[in-house]
Image (cartoon, grey):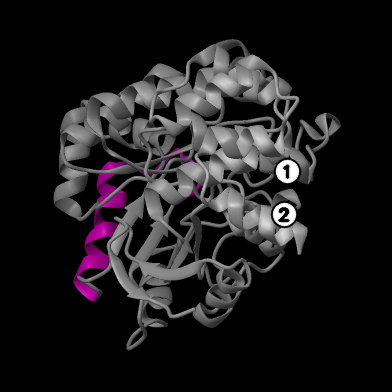
Amino acid sequence: MIFGQRFYEMNNMSLPDTVQVLFPDINSGLAKIAEKVYNDQRITYDEGLLLFEKADLGFLGVLADHVRVKNNGNYTFFNRNFHFEPTNICIYNCKFCSYKRKINEPGSWEYSYDDLLGRLKEYDGKPLTEIHIVGGVHPKRDLHYYGKMLQLVKSHRPDIHIKAFTAIELDFMIRKAGMELREGLKLLKDYGLDSIPGGGAEIFNEEIRKQVCFEKSDSELWLEIHRIAHELGIPSNATILYGHIEGYSDRIDHMSRLRELQDLTGGFNVFIPLKYKKENNLLSEAGEVSVLEDLRNFAVSRIFLDNFDHIKAYWPMIGKEIAQLSLAFGVDDIDGTIDDSTKIYSMAGSEDKSPKLSTEELVRIIKEAKRVPVERDTLYNKLHVYEV
């Protein structure tokens, strides 16, 4: 009864007062951050680093949940989607990747237009809002090849939102077609591209990037592609790959650059922290970070990225249980049905080897976390709010 009464009292307190009650020995720097978060003031790079290095996980949860509720109330979003991965053949050799293969190497695939259409027809008469198309950077496929793919989707299901091609894929396919970035992105939009996923960002620190994906498009080019896309009316997602050889300062640097671009364009829909998985790749000796570190990363992301409306936990990567737990640490989106249509993380040792959830299962997971399930479209328009 005493705890229940204290909890009731704290629900009627300001955030700084709640922090003071729960964490009476908190240092002045962290107390100042709580004040700034309560007053909707942006925290600095150094304060973000302090949260990573010194803040108690419970403290982070309180602050992150405050921001989450301020932005989205008790809503937790999901959508009806599936992935189509045209190929895992790739010109790059990223050390963290368990997915890529060379042409004719065992385990490689090159799906055709007919393969795509066949997969899409499986959803005829079924509710579906999004197709997510990403894959390897195939040396022989350019913008026009993938443009026809977009046209096929739109001709069969014009109602479906196409979220397709990471900045890394876009860089190569546009260059291969002999076009400039703006010209190529505009043409892809004409072909049917609706938005861009956040993959390929990895980690922006150039020195770390050289160690884990030295052949890939650099950080500034990733940001430039997303900036141009936003200017053309193509929204996108943003990601980070965390838990390998980067440090906390690298994560804050990464989020700072995203925050700056979001200030400029407002074109990012959501931030998605992606956990490094160690199986079957050249970074395996780095190991994997703990669940506590996952939650810390979600919480700091929510607190630091004040101009991002949404933080997503990608359940096929971290598992359903951790995704559910993340809803208490700033996360308000757990992706979608997926329908066992992605191999990128299962090949790297993700928790879910055959990622697939029904709408009913997603709703149950969210309700068990005492949140309100909301089916959304890709742009976070509410399609259905479920009763709790």
Q: Earlier in the sequence, mark 1 or mark 2?
A: 1
Q: Quadrant of residue 55?
A: top right
Q: Is residue 88 left or right of residue 38?
A: right
User: Which residue does the numbered mark 2 point to in the structure image?
Assistant: 350
Q: Which residue is mark 1?
A: 277
Amino acid type for the residue under numbered disc 2: Ser
**Residue shown at 35% from the left, 21% from the top:** 260
Q: Classify mark 1: residues with Cα within 10 Å, few (<14), some (14-19) or many (20+).
A: many
Determine which quarter of the picture holds residue 382.
bottom left
- Residue 336 visible within the image: yes
Magenta segment: does it hold 136?
Answer: yes
Element assignment for label 1: loop
Query: Which of 274 and 46 lies nearest the eye of the viewer?
Result: 46
Q: Is residue 114 left or right of residue 316?
A: left
Q: Secondary structure at mark 2?
A: loop
The residue closer to the viewer here, 194 or 134, is 194
Q: Which residues are magenta?
A: 134-156
Camera-nearest residue between 182 and 49: 49
